[in-house]
Amino acid sequence: MNTLLSATAITKSFAGIQALKGISFELRAGEVHALIGENGAGKSTFTKIVTGALQPDSGEMSICGQRITNLTPQTARALGIAAIYQQPLLFPHLTVAENIALALENGTHGWRVDWKRRRTQARELLDRVGVHLDPKRIAGSLSMAEQQIVEIAKAIGSDAKILLMDEPTALLTDREVDHLFSLIGQFRQAGVGIVYISHRLEEIQAIADRITVLRDGCTITCRDAAGIDRGELIELMVGRSLASIFPKHTVAMGPTALEVRNLSNSSLGLHDISFSVKRGEILGMAGLVGSGRTELAKTLFGLSPDTCPIYLDGRAVQIHSPAQAISLGIGYLPEDRRQHGLILDMALDENISMASLDQVCRMGLVQRGKEAAQGKKYILDLHIKAAGVSVAARTLSGGNQQKVALARWLAINPKIMILDEPTQGVDVGSKSEIHELIGQMAARGVAIILISSELPEILGMCDRIAVFREKTIAAVLDRQEATQARIIGLAFGHADAAILETGQV
Amino acid sequence: MRPKFRLSGIQWALLGALLFEVIVFSASSPAFLTWTNGMEILRFSVELGLLVVALTPILITGGIDLSVGSTIGLVAVIFGLTWQNLHLSILSSAALALLVAGICGLVNAALISYLNLPALIITLGTYSLYRGVSEGITRAAISVTGYPASFLRLGQGYLWSIPIQVFVFLLFITFYAVLLHRSKIGRALYAIGLNPEGARYAGLPVKRYLALVYLLSGIVSGIAAIIYVAHLGLAKSDLGTGFELQAITAIVIGGTSVFGGRGDLFGSVLGLLFLCVLQNGLHLLAQPSEATGVLTGALLILVVATDLVTERLKAARQGLVRWRRPLLLAGTAGTAVIVVALTLVLRSSQTGSGTGSGRHHRPVIAVMPKAKGDPYFISARAGAEEAARQLGVDLIWDGPTSLDPSMQNELVESWITRRVDAIVVAVANKGSISTVLRKARQHHIPVLTWDADAEPDARDYFLNQATPKAIADSLADEGARLLNGKGEFAIITGPLSAENQNEWISYIRQRVAERYPQMKLVTVLPSDDDRDKAFTQTQNILKVYPQVKLVIAISAPAVPGAAEAVQQAGSSVDVIGLSLPTICRPYIRSGVVQTIVLWNTRDLGYLTVYAGWLASQGKIPADATATQAGRLGALDVRGSEIILGKPVLINKANIDRLNF
Amino acid sequence: MNHRVRETALAATIVALLLLLGWRTTGFFTPANLVDLFLANLPTMMIAVGMTMVILTGEIDISVGSVFAICSVVMGECARTGLPMVVSLVIAIVAGALLGAVNGGLIAYVRIPSIVATLATMVALRDGLRWYTQGAWIQGLPQHFQWFGLSQSSFIGLCAAVVAVTVGLSAAGLNNLRIGREVIATGSNKAAAHMAGINTSRVVFGVFVLTGALTGLAAALNSVRFNQVPSNSGLGLELKVIAAVAVGGAAITGGSATITGTVLGVVLLSGIGSALTFLGINAYWEKAIQGGIILIAVAVDALQFYRKDKAHTLAA
């Protein structure tokens, strides 16, 4: 097998911090080479260097045996490198067809735009991905998952020799994931080299030929995927062994903290939702992306208010705004950390105090000393790795950012905490720390709603699990009766359940 | 703990530039670094400064408010009209005016924050709307004056030799500094500027706070309007024109980003001071007003570009972005442009100081036209320069480049500070300028007015080229002659708010009503002193009012505009008006324009300097009935008016003998 | 796309206005009046086409009024020195393009926010021109200056052709040329455009140069309608142009605007000004009415967007 891409001793530093200390990586034709590591290990930076978005400080890179210097996005494309990024990068005002075309066409397609060709090309590619999406739809109207599919179609259409996929499945349903994997299989057979980056170790074990582990900007090892087990991988990534991933404490539950009866929200499409959470209980919410979990969280938190009453400690209230929700003791850790969870350009203490400003204010004036002290306390308590309380949140790694976002809600001393994908895109080390924190909150008597797409997390952490399907709750399962297969069955509806009972998660 | 107060790089640069400014100006003009001059700078920066503090939080949220200048106009008009016409007390009309200001702010707030519309477009709409309403309800012509001294003290008086409005300004700076930098609202505003969605998810009341800053901006504009009225002693629909862009310039120079989330009040105030000191200093150095604009523009680019380039250089060094050649090229090009601009300024400042250096020996006569770009005043300037050469005096010729009435006051103030030997002003707003002219007289500087008069007690002499009534009568008589005393006619004026023109129009109406009852004025349309607009308006008149047989254009650029329209339409409508021979010559020759009424503008310009010199030398005795004025020979003096002569009717017969 | 709705609504408003004019007035629909109206608003129309592209990329240019004044003076000065008219025209266009390049360079390469950069050039260029001309008009132009030495009717034909070509080419170019799509892509998502290999800096630079050139062309065509050139033309032109583009449905954040919408916006706003005179409404209210129209146009758009937003969430 010939080598498509080889990189040796790549280094790169930002603002004096060395992000890559010496990455070596090799990709052969026809293999799926997984790249794993904690957040901040350097995976995304390395991807950007390979696609020409960033220039390395030192090190050598060659593509198809040819030494490459000064790689730009354009030359990378010309060399047959394509990438699917973690965050879809689309033109919201343009159609799906044009989004695909702009990524694929280059100067050779002439001055004029051939609309007909663009549309047929888009339809073909979307068919290959196995999704029925109208190429004439405006990208701005697509859901996140649909946007990710367009990204995949773009990458497929590029006829790339080297394909980088950074968390391509984060937003996809299992069915779409399966289809993607079969596509990957086809590419492998066609001799394409695929760099596959994911936090989902099960996926990696399922499709990877080789695995390269990065830690702290260095290549730790490169192994054949066959015969490696998860525990060993985790140990390689974090540099220490993790005794238990999901610490489930048994907590004495208190009275019901929150209850909704037949809740509906016409603007978000939610209907007939009834459930309750007790103090100290962790209620899991499983389901496909877009099944109504985040929508419910937004309704409860007053982001998309509706007229249905919500019962807090048995008292009916209507929540009109996030401010009101906070004053009632509800906290919400949103799914999108960078857009919603934090103000990235503000200092850590300012981010932490943001939802509980009144605590550090006197007569409406912010007391900086008190605020900084509070920030410092949480940085110590949550083991946030940062140079101080006054650095911008942007400078932190994903896991640490998530801990800061969580600290904001710990500071309001919530009675009810809604956590939306709290560990998505978070490295394994931080992940278990966050799980530990969730457990501690429950132990303090906080009623917790945990929304997660990672079934092991749901199964490991939760007392009861509400499974969502088509904007309502399909069933609520007890911890004892819940299995992956059952949850998937409920999430897809019974027709699909039999097929997926054995499927990969 | 972080340091409580930190200057950003751009602010250090600005502070340095401000110091540099102060040093240069005080070195070249002894009058600059004095208490009174400092206080005058402050006085003139208050109205703009109030807008600057109100707009800073808006820019920090990533928004913009272009309507503040128009709000000033509207509030001033409401304030004036309720006081004058409804006979409310000053206090209650102020309250009512502030209520209107609040409504102005509320409209912006509602549309921007609750309907989530782009601030730039919304406030562009209200910019036009508020100004339009204030012009509509006053027909742009009413200017309210005659305020009691107790009220004028607010804008013109002193407390412990500090102008009173400065205290109001300090109050608002403090209020806004606390709001923005100490309160939780301010914290939220920064968060909104950086990431509005993120702020909403953190439970911050984004819409309410956004609405608050726009509402406050309306109210503060209202307060600025009332102070402005007290300052000028005049309420009129065109107050505050162009203030919004000046305020934004000051804020951006002060380091606030238009993208939101970055900047502070200190920087904005620094930017404001920087601009006001620049303007004052350039006036003291007798630099033309245009220099301020050119320098401001160049410095705005220089400051922001330096900030960006340093940041990008830093980033490039740290490997965040690649250093690109085009950036370097553009940077060089930008610097080159700025260097050229600065050289221009320096070169002319050298010539300026060349004549200025002898000012202890040679008298300095300062003459102000109503507007600098107007062809009428340009032709007068030639005469003024002629007299200056002849008498061996230094001439400062400067005037407003925009409609805003405070510009004249500011120039006179700087001339008082500079201690010129005589001030000769073509008055744009009688009510507003008289106070400052009286002040000049208190400082024993002879004050003369020309073209249009101030209050009689505010000046020593008025150079009377022709009274408004004489001009209007000549125009009306000439029109009647052409129409044989009957028929319809239309008037094209300058800007709707021009005081002179409005006076002429009223005298024309009066004369026509008295003498020519069969003549009828069908419409008055504005040309904004724009030739092209006068052209379009005349085209409309020809079509909408086919019975019109005569167009009277009473602004210098409007006559050729109207004439061209008539000529292109092949119409037989007569055009007369008030304009200059030079720009009307082709039309008078071709017979489209029958007559223009004017005095010899060159002679008038000559007289401004000559009479100014005579007055400064005390060569006009108190009871004189005539005075020798150089090549003009003996001129009549009636009371405190020096009479130049009657308006001349210029037509085909004499046009080629006139060279102005 | 909601552009079609917006354009239909605009067209309907214009038709309603025309019907009102036809019913209440005489003389509006004479060919002479329509020609006058066209010529008077030619600069707005030409510059609005360029401004549409600037706004499409998510930027703004408030210096066009000052550039317009400078190009008019350049045109006059060149013609006065006896250069052939075509050469003067080309020089005026090049002058506009150069000033556009200064704006574009500051914005695309130095990365100064466009509103700041063009605010600075607007003030500096306007006052610089005043300084240079001292307010004097350019007179003593050769006989063939007016109408380019053509007859009045053939000049009007020439103008009509220029506008038609400009509007047609821009609309077609935005829709069907790769470079046009790149303009839209840049405004829609700059990061994505960069990743797709689009040189976004060059695109932004390009639209400013184009707008400058169009401003120069408009200034040249406008100045030859007369036999002397004033030095203060184009005051307030930038606001007129931006208002027209906004009424035409452009999103100020970029990525969404059409030439058709802009043309309709120009027609509506300029039609209103003339209509007021014809309907005998007092000129004092003109600004207020124009402001009201801008607000209504944008607010209606928002309400429409609300409904669409809701419908879409339901569908999803």
Image (cartoon, coloured by chain):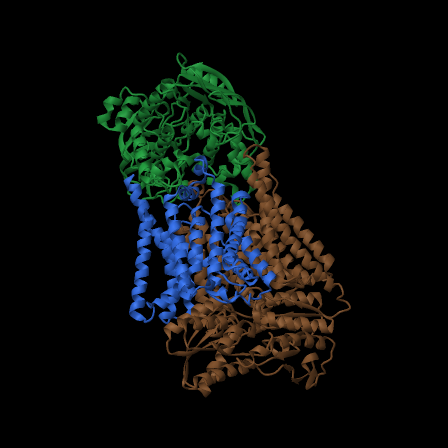
Hue used for the chain lettered C: blue
Hue used for the chain lettered A: green
Residue C67 percent location from the top left of the image? 52, 56
Q: In terms of depth relative to the viewer, which is nearer, B288 or A191? A: A191
Query: Residue placed farthest to the bottom in the image?
Result: B515
Image-quadrant location for residue B319? top right
Q: Say if residue B240 shows up in the picture.
A: yes
Q: Say if residue A106 shows up in the picture.
A: no
Image vertical order of residue C165 relative to residue A98, above or below: below
B368 left or right of B575?
right
**At 55% across and 40% down in the image, what residue appears?**
B326
Q: In terms of depth relative to the viewer, which is nearer, B133 or B5? A: B133
Image vertical order of residue B498 relative to residue C184, above or below: below
In the rendered image, which quarter contains the N terminus of chain A?
top left
In the rendered image, which quarter contains the C terminus of chain A?
top left
**At 76% across and 65% down in the image, what residue appears?**
B358
Q: Which chain is brown?
A: B
Residue C253 percent location from the top left of the image? 43, 47
Image vertical order of residue A142 relative to residue C134, above or below: above
